[in-house]
Amino acid sequence: MHRRLTLFAHHFLSNLTNTNNSLRTLPTLTSLHPHPYSNHVPTPTPHHQNINLSTTPFHRRTPNPSDPTTLIKDDAISLCCKMWIDNFRHPDTAVTNLSSFLRRFELWLLAYQKVATDETGSYTPRSSIPNSTLQDLLSLRNAVLDRNFKWGSRLKFFIKSPRDKTDYDSLSKRKIKTILTTTQPSPFQDKIVQEVLLMILEPIYEPRFSPKSFAFRPGRTPHTVLRVIRRSFAGYLWYIKGDFSTLLDGMKVGLVINAVMRDVRDKLVIDLLKDALVTPVVTSKVDETEGKKKKKKRKYQKKRVLAEDEPKPDPYWLDTFFGFVPEEAEKVPNWGHCGILSPLLANICLDELDRWMEGKIKEFYVPSKSDVIWNSPEGEVEQGNTSWPEFVPTSGPDKTRKMDYIRYGGHILIGVRGPRADAATLRKQLIEFCDQRFMLKLDNESLPIEHITKGIMFLDHVLCRRVVYPTLRYTATGGKIISEKGVGTLLSVTASLKQCIKQFRKLSFLKGDRDPDPQPCFRMFHATQAHTNAQMNKFLSTMVEWYRYADNRKKIVNFCSYIIRGSLAKLYAAKYKLRSRAKVYKIGSRNLSRPLKEKKGQSPEYQNLLRMGLAESIDGLHYTRMSLVPETDYSPFPSNWRPDHEKSLLEYIKLEDPKTLEEQQSFIREQGLVSPQDYISMLVWNYKKNSLPMDQLSLIKSSESVVGNQHLLVGSNQDDGDHKSREEDENDGRMNAAQI
């Protein structure tokens, strides 16, 4: 048996050497078909190198820079978290080297996953990305690093969208001319580069931005603005509203680059941003006459069927809610080929305005000792009723001069507590500042000064003042409770009914102003009653959330429900030929939860069909009565508010600081480790034992009180040396417990 195995091995090795001699000159499949975007020179690789029959020790191969799988070392999410933590730890240091982050292939892969998800509508895990796509992504990264990338390319791509199946090499001249001369969506590779730059630049600028700006920033919404206004703008008499939305349409390239270079001085990133702003965008359109002719020839248009990898459009309820976007949040900047970088660049440029206004707020503040709510020298400590912060007492002849400022996108709101002349002086200085820094020409009409009694419109909410006469109760020095009638103002934040009617009219849900009449929403004509009711319920739930902090939340949501219910009733009357809304309500009930059937072909009873599973359940409309609408959210808002992610970052940085651990250890040495339950039990035991309340924390702080109180608690007559030794033993025990 052993001899047969020896002969077999001899013949196998001899045949192997012969075949290797014949195949020595044949290249491998990889060398015959190199990747079209790779810079790797193909080299023939003989097959016999794949079989290692020597007894030499195995050495690990060096990573191939052209292989994308070897470049994925860390998790991209952990890398992004590290960038956020480092920038929040040192928010004032200028950044000079970002090329190291641009080289990290993990960020490019994460950017591809995000952009592909937006394109296809489904998440693409890393394991399902083919190797050819990784090679294309690597070639795009190398082109950016080698400065060979061009924004807005129409025909030559390093990587294409998963939905793009076009063969650009076989296109006709007419199609190529159409692609080059008409408006096209942003290329897929441009979106990836924008996403990578956003992941790198956003952690750098977020800790540097002013807390007075709220638009286009994570964790900040219009609801945050309304809560800040309710918390901080109480007591202001004069308001200045400014519209800087023209700056969101575009700014000079030099101003944008100078604003970026205040904190980022990496030449590669600056050149990428500059090229994105300078490269022209083709915006010409197809001739309208040709489009009209084609539409006339085509009488019947077939229903469009979505492709398998094509994302679904927004549902009807979400599309309707987007029509209610306020004027301040309607415009989103889109500069050149910057794409999603444009809002960040706009905030970088307008941050100089925020910092200038913060300086003016400190200059304007003049405290008055007789003021009952703002009388501290710094202006940060506020007095009054903390559970009712929007109430501002108006008694007293002298007032504290105070000012506050807030910005949402290109719109600003300034509140002034003082004479109108101060507001006029501030407006003049603001006009000069915008002219010098942003080259923006403003006048008094673009920055109107309005009194609080007229009502200030901001984010579709009206800020107004109500005079109230509450009963103020306080405790005098002798412990006597005194009740007095006070006079004060209450800042009211109410949703604008006029603006709501305007938005509904724009969406063709009603007509008329003084007596609005609901109109049928024929867009849902071919949908079932259950689907239509479900869509409108989602819309109403979103409206309830949008008006969450409005004082008239019940009234405005009830009005929205009335319009939606009337629109659906008219739709069902036209669809089922019931002639009037009254007949629809009679059959379908007030909330339209009962099925509406045509007269012809009456089916069996609806409950029987529903029990057998042959009918779709119909949900009635929500909030058909005002009592069903939830109350306004008056939860207190802290003065130094921060988003949750910033709180977590700052807390993590604080816990990582070794000074924090030293402070905790010194506190435990001085105060000891006593839980609240132990502290209460010691107080109760001392009271029962000696009929005297004793503070056990004082026992830990001072040795003298420990000696006296131990005599009362234990009742022993030992000398002071025994007490000192007992105290040392207790301290040692506490330190051991703290170490454990």
Image (cartoon, rainbow, N blue to C red):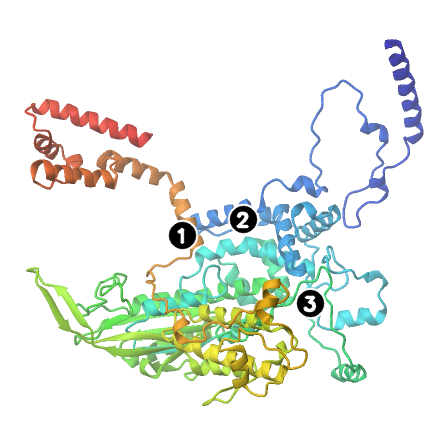
Q: Spatial distance from mark 1 to mark 3, Cα to Cα?
A: 38 Å
Mark 2 element type = helix
**Residue 309 x, y percent position in the rendering:** 71, 59
Near mark 2 (Cα within 10 A), the count class, few <14, some 14-19 or many ≥20, is some
Mark seen at residue 80: 2
Q: Which residue is mark 3?
A: 185
Residue drawn at the location 73% of the way across and 55% of the way down: 159
Of residues 151 and 492, the one drawn nearer to the viewer in this rendering? 492
Residue 7 sits above or below residue 171 on the image: above
Where is residue 609 shown, x and y percent of the image?
A: 61, 67
Q: Is residue 105 left or right of residue 688?
A: right
Task: Give me the C-alpha separation between circle 3 and circle 2.
Answer: 28 Å
Q: Residues within 10 Å of mark 1 (few under 14, many from 20)?
A: few
Going by the numbered disc 3, the residue's amino acid type is: Pro
Q: Residue at x 32, y 30 (%)?
A: 739
Q: CA distance from mark 2 to mark 1?
A: 17 Å
Residue for point 85% across, 28% down = 48
Label 1: which residue?
647
Residue type at tag 1 = Lys
Q: Amino acid at mark 2?
A: Cys
Task: Indicate whether 303 appears above or below 310.
Answer: below
Q: Is residue 14 visible?
A: yes
What element does badge 3 sit on?
Answer: loop
Examine the image and state in which quarter residue 666 appears.
Answer: top left
Residue 431 at x, y percent in the picture: 42, 77
